[in-house]
Image: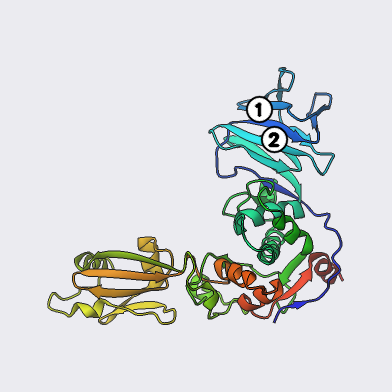
């Protein structure tokens, strides 16, 4: 059962450093002030203020950063800082090489050289960052109660992994290695409300340790324990029957192939299916999630079949239909923890965010992070 240990959450003053376009080898960018103003500083230059519309072009060179400021003047620096004195300040960042979409961010920007690309570090308040992540992970049109759930999950992950990239000089990256982050939230004010209502709240287990808040797109009607995927059991990640995820966009899928191609596939696992054998023996039904697909006296891990064919999930039936094999699957993702589509459905049916978290995670507590920090400081 989920317990909320405190409703009084102090304002978060935790700041993060997020590496932008971390999975790209960015060689040049255009920084533009969108709103508010920025104070620009670098070693060997007098700090200047930039107003909306002012742009800086920054190009990586062998000996540092070549910059063209908003007045058209070129300079060479080792690194350059764009500080946001005002919380409402917004900048856009447009990579030129490679050519990528322009994105808008709040907070500041630190630009340097890292290995063979630019280092682009967004210096941003935790809660502002969570708003951006929640919108990407939760989509633009989810119910308010779901955004509360997503904010808690994203915040828990961020704080649990806050030192993931410490040796590289930042906290988290903006890719799937950490959490998808494409800048400030733009689409739905409920994202901001959901984050503000849950400000500072995280999920912990019975030992007051931050959980690994894993989630997936759709469970197909049944989640599975963590040990089924990562070989390590977690008391808070137990299997759950999940009718809320049935009948939704990603709840079912199907793939087909010839029986002879399936038999050739079995050979890759040294499974020889006799020519005179009844092909019905190739079938499999998963009323509940299974670990292995068994054929004759042999077996293959269901997770291996999913990986080999890049199926959406490992929750599928194998049906023999004449000379065809029909793979009828359920769900999308690893199936551990919270089903996002199921949680959205619950929110749409007016379940409270604590009830949604309670449904998908076993024996967890909702705790303000700063209370947790205080608990372990004594």
In this picture, residue 14 sits left or right of residue 322 = right
Q: Position of residue 188 (x, y in %)?
A: 68, 53
Q: Position of residue 304 (x, y in %)?
A: 38, 68
Return the residue found at the far left.
276
Q: Tell me whether the residue at label 1 lies in contact with that at label 2, contact meaning CB atoms closer than 8 angstroms.
A: yes
User: Which quarter shows the N terminus?
Assistant: bottom right
The relative height of residue 172 versus residue 231 in the rendered view (above or below) is: above
Give how far apart the Cα atoms at labels 1 and 2 are: 9 Å
Mark sitting earlier along the chain (1/2): 1
Instruction: Identify residue for label 2.
Output: 111
Name the residue rendered at 31%, 74% in the picture. Answer: 318
Name the residue rendered at 68%, 77% in the picture. Answer: 355
Name the residue rendered at 65%, 38% in the picture. Answer: 119
Instruction: Identify residue for label 1.
Output: 58
Tell me the crowding category of disc 1: few under 14, some 14 to 19, or many 20 or more residues within 10 angstroms, Cα based: many
In this picture, residue 262 sits left or right of residue 102 = left
Q: Is residue 341 visible?
A: yes
In this picture, residue 154 sits left or right of residue 99 = right
């Amino acid at each position: 059962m989920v317990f909320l240990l405190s409703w009084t959450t102090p304002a978060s003053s935790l700041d993060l450093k997020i590496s932008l376009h971390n999975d790209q080898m960015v060689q040049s960018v255009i920084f533009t002030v969108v709103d508010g103003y920025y104070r620009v500083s670098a070693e060997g230059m007098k700090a200047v203020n930039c107003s909306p519309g002012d742009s800086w072009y920054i190009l990586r060179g062998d000996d540092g950063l070549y910059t063209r400021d908003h007045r058209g003047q070129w300079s060479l620096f080792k690194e350059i800082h764009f500080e946001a004195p005002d919380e409402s300040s917004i900048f856009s960042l447009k990579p030129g090489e490679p050519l990528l979409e322009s994105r808008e961010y709040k907070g500041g920007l630190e630009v340097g050289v890292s290995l063979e690309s630019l280092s682009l570090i967004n210096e941003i308040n935790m809660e502002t960052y969570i708003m951006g992540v929640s919108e990407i992970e939760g989509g633009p049109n989810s119910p308010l109660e779901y955004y509360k759930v997503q904010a808690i999950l994203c915040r828990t992950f961020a704080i649990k992994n806050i030192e993931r990239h410490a040796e590289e000089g930042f906290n988290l990256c903006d890719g799937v290695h950490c959490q998808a982050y494409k800048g400030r939230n733009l689409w739905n004010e409920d994202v901001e409300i959901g984050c503000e209502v849950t400000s500072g709240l995280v999920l912990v287990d019975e030992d007051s340790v931050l959980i690994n808040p894993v989630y997936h797109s759709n469970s197909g009607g049944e989640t599975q324990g963590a040990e089924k995927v990562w070989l390590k059991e977690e008391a808070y990640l137990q299997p759950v029957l999940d009718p809320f995820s049935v009948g939704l966009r990603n709840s079912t899928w199907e793939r087909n192939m010839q029986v002879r191609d399936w038999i050739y596939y079995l050979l890759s696992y040294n499974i020889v299916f006799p020519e005179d054998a009844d092909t019905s023996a190739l079938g499999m039904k998963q009323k509940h999630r299974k670990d292995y697909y068994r054929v004759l006296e042999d077996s293959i891990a269901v997770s291996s079949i999913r990986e080999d064919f890049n199926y959406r999930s490992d929750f599928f039936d194998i049906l023999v239909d004449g000379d065809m094999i029909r793979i009828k699957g359920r769900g999308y993702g690893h199936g551990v923890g919270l089903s996002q589509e199921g949680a959205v459905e619950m929110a749409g049916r007016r379940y409270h965010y604590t009830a949604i978290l309670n449904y998908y995670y076993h024996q967890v507590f909702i705790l303000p992070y700063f209370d947790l920090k205080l608990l372990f400081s004594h």
